[in-house]
Amino acid sequence: MADRLPANPRVITPVESIGTYGGDLNLALRRGDGTHLLRLVGYEGLFSWDLGWKEMLPNLAESYEVNEDATEYTFTLRKGVKWSDGSPFTTADIAFAYNDLLKNPDWLGARPDYIAVPDDTTIEVVDDFTYKVKLAKPNGLYIFQLTNVDGTQLALFNKAYCSQFHPTYNPNANADAVAAGLADWRALFEQKCAEMGGEQRWMNPERPVLEAWMVETPPTATAEFSIFTRNPYYFKVDTEGNQLPYLDRLNFAMSNAGPDMILRAMNGQVDFQDRNINPASQKPLYLENAEKGGYHLVDEVPSNMNVMLVMFNQTVSDPVLQEIFSKKDFRVAMSLATDRQEIIDTVYVGQGQFHQAAPRPESKFYDESLATQFTEYDLDKANSMLDALGLEKRDGEGYRLRSDGKRLSINVETFDTARPDWVDNLELLKAQWQKAGVELLVKVVDRNLVDEHRRANLHEMHVWGGDGGLDVVAAPHYYMVASDESAFGVPWYYWFNDNAAPGAVEPPDSVKKQRELYDQLVQTPTTEGQDALMKQILEISKDDFYVMGISLTGKGYAVVKNNVHNVPPSQPAAYTYPTPGPMQMAQIWKSE
């Protein structure tokens, strides 16, 4: 074991007890859901969150130092950490990730926040286990960003293996790609050493990893099961010095839809599951079947602040719709025309409370007026406001007419795999908005198509879950234009990245002001200063009312078999956290 562990392994205190070795953990996986694997298996960065989502703990890094203005960070890695093939994890791997991938404009992967402008970041390797990062501008959130899920990008690429697909290290990289039937080295690199997001990351069993389990049977489109096996060089131990993980394998039953996964969980065929199986409407059935299925439920406190957000695309290509959507009074009127109580009673079995796109009550950024504004159901007022906007004319079926004489119809796409409740919500909205003379056309499509159309600005209206209820600073994209998930103005986001980029549109002054405030926030080294700036951003969000919400997301839950140990009775639930990664899956064990 001394040959497999670092000099100073990370010690994990078991939630319940020291475990015993052996056994498989049975789970379910929706095809194409690389995010599930990232959260379960792939959360191994330089730092990690503690279970309470408060402390940023050293993980692959052993320590760090930062100068006074937060422009230079010095990191020390754990000596002796090994990749799953037994090769050493060193600063050479970090430098490869920074210089050859994250800072390389030809690489196909995504750039996380801590290297949003590649030229602003330089890395200096001091020795095999020490390196410095120098920033052109102060970044008081740098360790925070490394601790979030995106931080795992830095510790994802084994240079010795992945460099053979990179033209800097292999002059024949493009020729090798063409011989494999691919366009160029970038496509081959993506196939062999994909970035952290998406299912492609888990398709290559030959790729060395630092996680507790390594893929043996990839989660392909035709696989019945995907199997992960123990990494013999994993760098963590329990408090008695036993190397983790306890479990031999993770067995994922592949599924095409959420209902299949729910049925497996309810029948006791999964040992631990907290994704795609826990809608609020199913909780009573789970409780009824718990004894028969041999499982129990544990709480998850969601970061999500809303069951479904509604975003009218203020940059939609249709100029008449764009003019309508850009008026705050239209957005307010549609919020007043929404009967939230009917949605809560019908779809969420009465569990919920009216809530806009606003931080959760548990958050230090909670603002009751932001959370509750325009949530009352007032159809008369909604109709009056729409009339005042010049939409008073109607066709023979009672629908309002636009200025060009066309019916005021709004198209929205959604999917029914992971979130069937959104389809139900939209059908209710369709009937409710009809009373206000607005036609909603709902189309159920593949989730990938929803994402593709949003990024290409081909959507008229977009619905999604409400990230940022607890992780307000880390996920502000429904309070301001912060990513391409800000579906009320994706081309504005592109403009911030590159004013001359194809499809970029200059945003309004208030949107620019929020971005200026957030840039100041990032450069502020103190938490107090960051919080004050975030509150200003939220005030602008309240005034402009970009995004409409329905109901506060209630407590979630996970299904846990009774012979599965070291699962905490409650934990936060979020992508940036990312649940259940910080609970340290490697300490889970099963009794007979």
Image: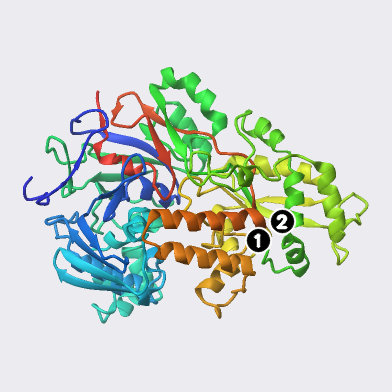
> Farthest residue in the left direction?
2
Q: Where is residue 396 in the image (x, y as percent from the top left)?
A: 93, 52
- Identified at 91% across, 54% down, the residue is 395
Q: Position of residue 61 (x, y in %)?
A: 21, 56
Report helix, strand or loop for mark 1.
loop
> Do the residues under discs 1 and 2 have CB atoms within 8 angstroms?
yes
Would you call the spot at circle 1 few (<14 residues within 10 Å), some (14-19), or many (20 or more)?
many
Quadrant for residue 339, please give it: top right
Question: Quadrant location of the N terminus?
Answer: top left
Q: What residue type is labelled 1?
A: His
Q: Is residue 413 left or right of residue 93?
A: right
For residue 450, above or below residue 509? above
For residue 98, above or below residue 148? below
Considering depth in this image, is 390 or 211 the residue closer to the camera? 390
Q: Position of residue 165 (x, y in %)?
A: 28, 72
Question: Quadrant location of the C terminus?
Answer: top left
- Sooner in the amino-acid sequence: mark 1 or mark 2: 2
Q: In this view, does 54 lie to the left or right of 338?
A: left
Considering depth in this image, is 176 or 518 the residue closer to the camera? 518
Query: In the rendered picture of this protein, how many numbered marks are placed on residues?
Result: 2
For residue 469, above or below residue 125? above
Q: Is residue 191 left or right of residue 435?
A: left
Q: Can residue 222 be seen in this view?
A: no
- Identified at 46% across, 65% down, the residue is 520
Q: How far apart are marks 1 and 2 (CA)?
A: 8 Å
Q: What residue type is labelled 2?
A: Asn
Would you call the spot at circle 2 few (<14 residues within 10 Å), some (14-19), or many (20 or more)?
few
Q: Residue 411 carries which label?
A: 2
Report helix, strand or loop for mark 2.
strand
Considering depth in this image, is 226 or 417 the residue closer to the camera? 417
Q: Mark 1 points at which residue?
A: 459
Q: Is residue 101 visible?
A: yes
